[in-house]
Amino acid sequence: MFNSLVVEKDEESGLASASVKQISLDDLPDGEVTVAVEYSTVNYKDGLCMSPKGGGLVRSYPHIPGIDYAGTVEQSSDDRYKPGDKVVLTGWRVGEAHWGGYSQKANARADWLVPLPQGLDTRQAMAVGTAGFTAMLAVMALEDHGMQPGHGPVLVTGAAGGVGSVATAILAHLGYEVAAVTGRPDTADYLKSLGATTIVPRDDLNETTRRPLESETWSGCVDAVGGAMLARVLGQMKYGASVAAVGLAGGAGLPATVIPFLLRGVNLLGIDSVMQPYDNRVRAWQRIATDLPMDKLEAMIHPATLSDLPQLGADILQGQVKGRVVVDVNT
């Protein structure tokens, strides 16, 4: 028997609640690889999956959330992995449609796993998690479209969140001037410690404007907000610059015009981390191991246990989680 955070639905009220329970290997869904989970983390989707109505993501109950986990292979029917291998899992709708990493053991398809790159341990991998993995995908996409240090500041919206924190640290480490957008003034010192050179108040970018183009300001942007802020930022991009869209904290709408695309050649790059192909996953994790300074990563970490997760799930839905929560599932 081992501990898992199990979300169960009350049939009378129709509402779900999460608690730590003991289950066995026989309770787990089938999978080609059994992983002894060491660490997981907390993402917005995890908060939704632990919420009373499942956030529209949970298909059936009981359910084990946790869209990310890292640990050691215990057994495998796939030749790519053998007992003792260290692995990371992010995406593939694990923790949503499939049972996830809020458990001391998990079964997975071999295709979902990535070998842990040299230079990272499982705790650091979960300090990165989907948020950091997405940040690295965004930086790679911007670089693939020509972004280089020395061409002007790079904007990071939602900078105090998980994606924004890691993106800020990576960009600063690579030599970029980083302008960090936040609606929480108390996070300014934290963002500067990650390498941000400028703090941009959220209200400066949160209002729509009738002007389709403003002064050319940003040489790139990692945008976790969407909505009116993304529309505003598009009109401030330098000629030929790109925005990597990674989230929609400010809404799914986009009250913009096509003018920035037509007159300035701006690129809007969609970043998906869930179904990302294997080769690009490996490339991103290798870049994380070399381009994310571990001291900056350590500064983002807030430790947690399985029993802390229900409250943390509620907190992240309210925008109250800063940096990266690392869940030690064995404490």
Image (tube, helix red, strand yellow):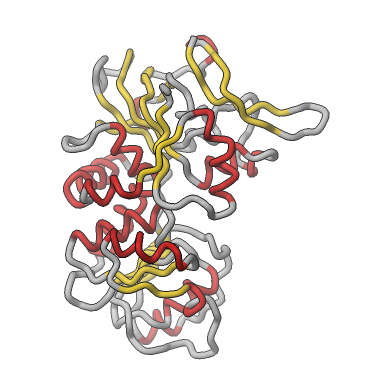
Q: Residue at x 34, y 42 (%)?
A: 127
The percent coordinates of residue 303 (x first, y second) are 40, 37
Q: Nearer the viewer, residue 131 or 197?
A: 197
Whether residue 275 is visible, yes or no, is: no
Residue 311 placement, left or right of 79: right
**Residue 129 higher or lower than 145, as above or below:** above
Whether residue 216 is visible, yes or no, is: yes
Q: Nearer the viewer, residue 320 or 53?
A: 320
Q: Residue at x 29, y 43 (%)?
A: 281
Determine the image quadrant of residue 233.
bottom left
Q: Residue at x 51, y 10 (%)?
A: 24
**Residue 267 higher or lower than 47, as above or below:** below
* Location of the C terminus (image quadrant): top left
The percent coordinates of residue 213 (x first, y second) are 43, 88
The percent coordinates of residue 52 (x first, y second) are 69, 38
**Residue 113 higher or lower than 291, as above or below:** above
Residue 279 placement, left or right of 253: left
Determine the image quadrant of residue 14.
top right
Residue 3 placement, left or right of 114: right
**Residue 150 higher or lower than 175, as above or below:** below
Determine the image quadrant of residue 82.
top left
The percent coordinates of residue 29 (x first, y second) are 51, 19
Q: Residue at x 40, y 42 (%)?
A: 302
Callout count: 0
Residue 201 placement, left or right of 228: left
